[in-house]
Amino acid sequence: MKRFSLLGLIFPTFLLLVIAALVSISWYVSGSVKQFYYDQVQDDLEKRAYLIAERVDPDKVLLADAGLDRLAKRLGAHIQTRITIIREDGRVLGDSEEDPQLMDNHATRPEVRSAMRGETGVVIRFSRTLQQGMMYVAIPFAPGERTVGVMRTAVSVAHIEQALGDLRQKLAYFGLLMTLVLAVISYFVARRISRPLEEMKRGAVRFARGNFDRTLPVKGAAEISALAEAMNRMAGQLDERIQTIVEQRNEQQAMLTSMVEGVLAVDMQENILRMNQAAGKLVGVDPLEATGRSVHEVLRKADLLLFVGDALQASRPVERDIALRVDGEERYLQAHGSILTDAQGQQIGALVVLNDVTRLRRLEGIRRDFVANVSHELKTPITAIRGSAETLADGAIDTPDEAHRFVAIVAKQADRLNAIIDDLLALSRIEQESEREGIELESGQLRPVLENAMAICGHAASEKRIEMTLNCTDDLQTRINGPLLEQAVINLLTNAIKYSDEGSRVVVDAVQLGDVIQLKVQDWGRGIPAEHLSRLFERFYRVDKARSREQGGTGLGLSIVKHISQAHGGEVKVHSRPEEGSSFTITLPVC
């Protein structure tokens, strides 16, 4: 259905009312003027009829005297009025315009009949005799108590109709002019009424779009001004409420975004209402693409989907550990679920909070492995010491050679036990200082550090006739912790010497490549099989466990090297092939 504008409704209505008023006024004026003219003519004709009747002898009427016709013609010509003298039987005795002998009997004429009843008869009709509209006024001619005839006067009303026609024409012109004038006035009045409402409509559209910068002008009629003020107040209140809602939404969004925990909100149909970045990262989906879609379509993780269903159905918070595989990586999540309710307390969905406990699980695994490895490593020297002590207690102490041999075993295993404890303490200290950023780095030259490490390992190298070579310029320097870096190089040199054949050689190279310094310890010993390289820097990991223990290794040396490299902001890598030797490279940033 087509809707008209307020201007389109008001203006035509005003215009129709104006036209109707003008037509009504014109009709009323025309009718009033016409009636006024007719009343004037009727009164004049009636007076003339009475004047003429006074001059007529009643006997002549009764005798149908021919002189009456001459009298009628003479008086009619004198006063410009048609005069007709009619006897009581309707016979025309005299007429100022026609021959009475040729005229019809007038007994049936309405005005004559009224006059015969003693009344004044007035009729306006078309005269077939004169071929024009006439007003007839007839009075009874009764000199005594008996009506002997009728005196009728008549004049043409053509001039009245012509005057009325001219009046109607003038009224029509005037009405047309007034219609145009009032149409313009009506348009501006309607426009004056509709313009403030149109401005309010545009303002309401702006308000609906959230644009509250421009207020509505307060003008016009009292009702319109009051409406504009009310809408401005409403807009102000809406603006404040929207600002509050936006601020709350932004705060909520900021909180969800900054949370390290994953947050997932679903409705009763298990469609995703909200998912923060952390949750998307944990389950491997894009939060923007996931919002509004079903969890079954997005997640496709059976354990997590089951937990979401349980959270929706549970009457109290639920908690569960969930294992997922995301991008080929095993991930462990601790899930907490509770129902979501609206302001009326009706359940509208569920809220799931996901905590990534993968690192904790791995740390727990590392701790268990570490405890098991430490227990195993400590058990070996302790068992040897205990066995030697029991043997000595059983009588071997009385035999000097046996006693000396078992005491030597106890001393060796005690040294091994002490080395394990020292390495554990050193590794723990390095890890703690790295976490607290307590390791102090100072700008220093590398050559003195490398020379000290080679000097400490020189005795072990000379026993196996291994040649050690250093390639390092004097000006090569960076930010280092001298004692720690020296310990790392000593550990690498010790391993290189242990696992190299007699007469072999070990080379230490230090060179700057761009914004890093590479410190390489290379030997040409037995080498390491490829399957062991990925775990070589784990605590207590050994390629050849029996031989390593025989040579006094603790299994912590390379792990210490890794942590020292990381404490310097660098890393350590290994390249090795069986029977070709190994090279360990520590990369340090240039500062």
Image (cartoon, grey):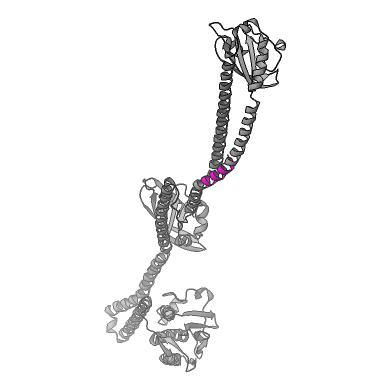
Q: Is the magenta stretch mostly helix, strand or loop?
A: helix
Q: Quadrant of residue 448?
A: bottom left
Which of these two is toward me, 319 or 118?
A: 118
On the picture, is 365 further left or further right than 126? left
Is 182 colored magenta in this rendering? Answer: yes
Q: In which quarter of the image is residue 239?
A: bottom left
User: Where is the N terminus found, in terms of image quarters?
Assistant: top right
On the picture, is 391 further left or further right than 337? left
Which of these two is toward me, 84 or 255?
A: 84
309 over 137 or under it: above or below: below
Q: Residue at x 47, y 56 (%)?
A: 211
- What is the span of residues highlighted in magenta in the rendered image? 179-190
Q: Is residue 522 in sight in this rendering?
A: yes
| Whole-percent x, y for residue 311 in the image | 41, 50
Residue farthest bottom in this picture = 474
Which of these two is toward me, 426 or 533?
A: 426
388 over 154 or under it: above or below: below
Is 208 colored magenta in this rendering? Answer: no
Q: Which residue is drawn at 63% across and 22% down?
A: 79
Which of these two is toward me, 419 or 243?
A: 243
